[in-house]
Amino acid sequence: MKSFVALVRAGVTMLRRNRMLLVSSLGLAVISMIIFGLLLGHNGSFKLVLGVVNEDQSPVSAQVVAQLKKSNSLTVYTGSQSSEVQALRDGNRNAVIVLTPGFGANLAQGHAAIQVYYDQSNPATQASAQMAVQSIVTEINQQATGRAPVVSLDQRAVSVHNLRQIDWLTPGMLGLVLLWGNLSVGEMLVAWRQQGIMKRLAVTPVRPTTLISSQMLARLLLSLAQCALLLALAIFAFRVQVVGSWLALLVTVILGALMMMALGFIAGSFAKTPETAATITILVSFPMMFLGGSYFPTNNAPAFLAPVIKAMPLTYVNDALRQIINNGVGLAGVQTDLLIIAAWMVAALIISVRAFRWA
């Protein structure tokens, strides 16, 4: 136990002195948040893909469809309800509105309703779609001069928490902190091996599991501190709200950090030089950074990329963080993501421990 505590203390000290690691892991996320927050935090919006089902086929409903198509912030497709809802499920639409039979007649009588289906997999586009459709409804109601609002929304599967781009971006930046701050642990192991530190440790009673677990705890403490700083920036500078459970958020951050470290240990177990380990880290991290949902939504990615995106562990880390921070879910709501993250962690640890070598 004493050797484990000593290794943890040594690991924390070395990580604290490694300024390049601090800059690369936390700095990238902070710079991204500041830039995106200042440019897009208050009024940025996505180009929305909207499906429209006109079952009424009246002049009034045709006018509503025409108004939607005129919007510069919308890409509008029309079709049957079954085809458009299926496109929504396949990730090819962000929302679907249905003008049911009798919409025009009901509007004339002052009590029409529009059904709206939203895509919950992307909270930012979901909230933006909600606001876009609401603006159309508001315009229709304003045209009914001297009367109470005549059109209401029958909203289905909609989060009540309206999101800005900075709200959607914040969980992705936390994912980046976990990625960059922990995947590079393999480079440290290879450097220790070259410097002879591993040989000196090999003649001590220290076991590989003790060494790996001590470094994981040291890096975990650093990751928790970095995530706390990033969240503080998001909350106080850009008024981002953590809607969900803080306990669920803590568990997700811990599991995500441990999983990324376990992947890093694999690189450290097989690479022979720090340069090789760094190359492996870059080759693994850059695709995850851009396809794992940190910066951009991936629900509208080309079909051939879907299996790649689903195979990336960062995808599940970011999804769990967004579900908690943006959608307000607890541990039960992200259990599938957490199980996948844990499976990645266990598999990577087994591989790294079996491939571990002192020299």
Image: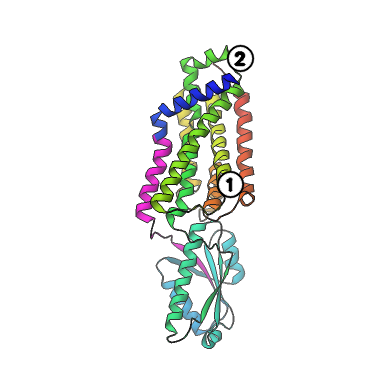
Question: Residue 286, can we see it?
Answer: no
Asked if 10 appears above or below 222 in the picture, the reply is above
Residue at x 49% of width, y 46% of height: 291
Residue 25 falls left or right of residue 204 = left
Where residue 349 is drawn, which disc sits there? none
Using the rendered image of the protein, determine whether residue 113 is visible from the camera's viewpoint: yes
Farthest residue in the top direction? Answer: 203
Q: Relative to the observer, which residue lies in front, 308 or 13? A: 13
209 shown above or below 27: above
Could you tell me if the residues under marks 2 and 1 are in contact, i.e. CB atoms within 8 Å? no
Classify mark 1: helix, strand or loop. helix
Q: Dividing the image into 4 quarters, which one contains the N terminus?
A: top right
> Where residue 46 sits: x, y (%)?
43, 60
Q: Amino acid at mark 1?
A: Ala
Dot 1 crowding, Cα within 10 Å, few <14, some 14–19, many 20+: many
The quarter of the picture where the C terminus appears is top right
Q: Which residue is mark 2?
A: 205
**Residue drawn at 46 percent across, 67 percent down:** 131
Q: Residue at x 40, y 40 (%)?
A: 28
- What type of secondary structure mainly makes up the magenta span? helix
**Closest to the observer, 266 or 256:** 256
Which amino acid lies under the numbered mark 2 shown in the image of this protein?
Pro
Tell me the crowding category of disc 2: few under 14, some 14 to 19, or many 20 or more residues within 10 angstroms, Cα based: few
The magenta region covers 23-52
The image quadrant that residue 226 belongs to is: top left
Considering depth in this image, is 342 or 47 the residue closer to the camera? Answer: 342
Q: Position of residue 298 (x, y in %)?
A: 50, 52
Q: Provide the residue designation for mark 1.
A: 248
